Image (cartoon, rainbow, N blue to C red):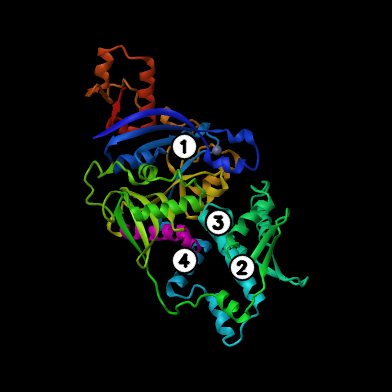
């Protein structure tokens, strides 16, 4: 039994343009995200949810919401990928290669090469120090960019990383050895190039301070200063006993030819302490959430709770471990490194959220997991021909950080007028002109279909079941019995319009 506690429209501030507007203006930041929402009690068959998704609904735990795109600052369009037509991009192939290399045990080939090229000759302290600081800063850049798979700069990650340098500063012969880094200027240059008319979100000095915090723990560093223009000056204690210090800062030897495995396992969506620990680390490190706010309760509500259940009509046991909500655990040998929260639906796999251990950010696990899931769907498709889509949530054209979803080609967007799926390539030029528009050729005007085609609450052909004082009634019976308020009538009409056909299968609660 599915029961809808229908809340109707609600407003919340938009998290998508908030980040951009921190750099631009205050007024737009106050823009609202307009949604229709409801809580579902009991169970909701996966096919009902999938039909609702085809009307632009999504779930977060047992809360379901539908963005009201025509009045939103950042319209959100459902996006899906037909896995049988998927062509990986250059960036996807690179990411995969990087992981394969790592698993084979030769990921840190640069380090290896340096060592084997100079087996007997020890590098001067200054060079080794510069090399170590460079590696450290490159990891920090990688951590930021790959944690933020939405960032357009992600596709340039390898180039950006190779541009990051810490150089010994040759002038001056004080007791301190001095090093400088170009990291901030280089990043700001890339930002300017790829975010066109936007001002950088932070001042050069603040960015420099952030990167300084990533290297300050190095025991050879005596102090760091950051200039207003972003230059980082690093002061390093000269080694007392040269031999020993050179030894101590040399990269740890890598166990050569030691192969690792990265495996996946479906577990039923539920709370698990090991997963939660990674989630907490991910939210606080990558998204800078307040550690106090990342608690078990909110995690459970957001990612472990699900009312999804078997389809209403028999479809066999379903793909993978069966229909419903799961966590796909990604393990590097025995160690849990990432968790993908997904819904196994009738026509495809819906990606809810992905989080990973930030210690492994250099592996770009976000990209890896998506590619892995696409592959797994394609395999299941052989047994279940109707199972063929990878649902990636919402696509927000106005938000540069969300465009990574469009890299999984050829994707389709849901037309907000006809609710047909249209190839993304056909939509983008329209979205460049107007952030809310129809995509389908069959769309006659810009008014959403839901306001036109659905049944009236008093239509003789159908009836909504309502729950009132612990009893379920056909709504029309109540109409005859009671004088119902206009407000309730229009609420039920809105519920039918937004939910679609399953509005008649789900029981509506009247408070
Ligand atoms: Zn917005």
Q: Earlier in the sequence, mark 4 or mark 2?
A: 4
C-alpha separation, residue under disc 3 versus residue under disc 2: 17 Å
The residue to which callout 4 is attached is 96
C-alpha separation, residue under disc 2 versus residue under disc 1: 50 Å
Q: Nearer the viewer, residue 358 or 200?
A: 358
- 65 to 340, vertically: above or below: above
- 253 to 26, vertically: above or below: below
Q: Which mark is residue 416?
A: 1
Q: Estimate how packed mark 1 is, as few (under 14), some (14 to 19) or many (20 or more) residues with alpha carbons within 10 Å.
A: many
Q: Earlier in the sequence, mark 2 or mark 1?
A: 2
C-alpha separation, residue under disc 4 versus residue under disc 2: 27 Å
Q: Quadrant of residue 187?
A: bottom right
- Locate residue 22, reporting x and y percent: 62, 41
The residue to which callout 3 is attached is 144
C-alpha separation, residue under disc 3 versus residue under disc 4: 19 Å
Apparent side of residue 341 relative to residue 178 in the rendered image (left or right): left
C-alpha separation, residue under disc 3 versus residue under disc 1: 34 Å
Asked whether residue 375 is drawn in magenta, I would say yes
């Amino acid at each position: 039994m599915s029961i809808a506690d229908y809340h109707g429209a609600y407003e919340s501030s938009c998290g998508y343009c908030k980040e951009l507007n921190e750099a631009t203006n205050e007024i737009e930041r106050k823009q609202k995200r307009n949604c229709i929402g409801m809580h579902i009690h009991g169970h909701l068959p996966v096919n009902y949810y999938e039909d609702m998704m085809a009307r632009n609904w999504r779930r977060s735990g047992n809360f379901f919401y539908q963005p009201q795109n025509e009045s939103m600052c950042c319209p959100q369009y459902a996006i899906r990928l037909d896995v049988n037509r998927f062509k990986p991009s250059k960036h996807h192939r690179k990411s995969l290669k990087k992981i394969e290399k790592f698993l084979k045990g030769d990921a840190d080939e640069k380090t290896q090469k340096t060592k084997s090229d100079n087996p007997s000759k020890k590098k001067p302290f200054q060079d080794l120090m510069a090399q170590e600081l460079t590696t450290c800063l490159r990891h920090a850049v990688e951590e930021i960019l790959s944690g933020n798979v939405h960032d357009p700069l992600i596709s340039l990650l390898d180039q950006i990383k190779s541009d990051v340098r810490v150089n010994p500063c040759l002038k001056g012969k004080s007791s301190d050895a001095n090093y400088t880094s170009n990291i901030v200027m280089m990043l700001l240059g890339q930002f300017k190039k790829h975010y066109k008319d936007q001002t950088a979100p932070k001042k050069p000095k603040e960015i420099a301070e952030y990167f300084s915090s990533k290297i300050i723990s190095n025991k050879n560093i005596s102090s760091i200063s950051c200039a207003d223009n972003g230059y980082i000056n690093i002061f390093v204690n000269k080694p007392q006993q040269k031999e020993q210090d050179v030894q101590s800062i040399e990269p740890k030897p890598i166990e050569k030819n030691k192969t690792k495995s990265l495996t996946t396992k479906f577990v039923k969506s539920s709370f698990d302490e090991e997963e939660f620990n990674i989630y907490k680390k991910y939210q606080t490190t990558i998204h800078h959430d307040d550690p106090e706010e990342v608690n078990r309760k909110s995690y459970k509500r957001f990612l472990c709770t699900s009312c999804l259940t078997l389809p209403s009509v028999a479809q066999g046991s379903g793909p993978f471990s069966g229909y419903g909500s799961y966590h796909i655990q990604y393990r590097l040998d025995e160690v849990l490194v990432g968790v993908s929260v997904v819904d196994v639906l009738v026509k495809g796999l819906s990606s809810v959220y992905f989080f990973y251990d930030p210690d492994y950010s250099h592996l770009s696990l976000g990209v890896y997991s998506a590619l892995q899931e696409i592959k797994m769907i394609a395999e299941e498709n052989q047994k279940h021909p109707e199972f063929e889509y990878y649902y990636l949530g919402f696509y927000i054209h106005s938000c540069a950080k969300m465009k990574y979803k469009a890299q999984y080609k050829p994707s389709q967007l849901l037309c907000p007028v006809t609710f047909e799926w249209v190839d993304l390539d056909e939509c983008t030029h329209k979205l460049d002109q107007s952030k809310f528009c129809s995509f389908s050729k069959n769309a006659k005007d810009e008014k959403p279909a839901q306001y036109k085609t659905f049944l009236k609450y008093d239509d003789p052909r159908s009836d909504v079941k309502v729950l009132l004082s612990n009893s379920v009634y056909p709504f029309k019976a109540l109409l005859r019995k009671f004088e119902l308020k206009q407000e309730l009538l229009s609420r039920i009409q809105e519920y039918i319009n937004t939910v679609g056909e399953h509005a008649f299968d789900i029981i509506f609660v009247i408070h």
